[in-house]
Image (cartoon, rainbow, N blue to C red):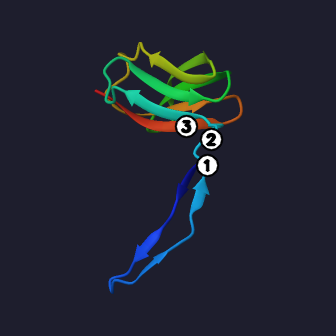
């Protein structure tokens, strides 16, 4: 728990202090969160890191800009911070692709990746 007090000073020098407010800084992450994709652009593989709130079977898809799925990989991702390498991508042509991370119900995240 932290406390903050706002003091506003106008251009004419008058100021007003407001009552302190408490802010709860301890919270639980309940949603999927993608931390990063490294390297991007990539040549034959890249690594993704994400927070997964609970153990789940996820699907990673790399789709062309026209929506065609070029690579699909199913993974069992544990709860917490997960790092995973997507490799064997050297046969993909150079260009822009969309990485989709899906669970059984929905698309959790989409990000643009570049193959060089």
Q: Identify the residue at horizontal 51%, vertical 64% (top origin).
A: 5
Q: Identify the residue at horizontal 55%, vertical 18% (top origin).
A: 73
Separation of residues labelled 1 and 2 (CA atoms): 7 Å
* 11 or 109: nearer the viewer: 11
Separation of residues labelled 3 and 1 (CA atoms): 28 Å
Q: Which residue is mark 3?
A: 109
Q: Identify the residue at horizontal 34%, vertical 83% (top origin).
A: 13
* Spot occupied by residue 35 in the image (x, y as percentages of width and height): 46, 33
* Residue 75, placed above or below residue 14: above
Q: Which residue is mark 1?
A: 24
Q: What's the mark number on residue 74?
A: none
Q: Give the SS element for disc 3.
A: strand
Dot 2 or dot 3: first in sequence order is 2
For residue 98, side relative to residue 114 (left or right): right
Q: Residues within 10 Å of mark 2 (few under 14, many from 20)?
A: few
Residue sticking out furthest to the right = 105
Residue sticking out furthest to the top = 88
Q: What's the mark number on residue 27?
A: 2
* 83 or 14: nearer the viewer: 14
């Amino acid at each position: 728990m932290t406390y903050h007090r706002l003091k506003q000073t106008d251009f004419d020098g008058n100021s007003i202090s407001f009552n302190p407010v408490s802010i709860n800084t301890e919270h639980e992450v309940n949603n999927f969160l993608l931390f990063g994709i490294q390297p991007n652009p990539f040549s034959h593989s890249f690594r993704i890191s994400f927070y997964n709130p609970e153990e789940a079977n996820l699907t990673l898809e790399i789709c062309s800009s026209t929506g065609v799925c070029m690579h699909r990989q199913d993974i069992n991702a544990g709860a917490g911070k997960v790092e995973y390498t997507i490799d064997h991508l050297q046969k993909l042509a150079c260009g822009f692709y969309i990485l989709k991370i899906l669970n059984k119900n929905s698309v959790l995240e989409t990000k643009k990746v570049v193959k060089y």
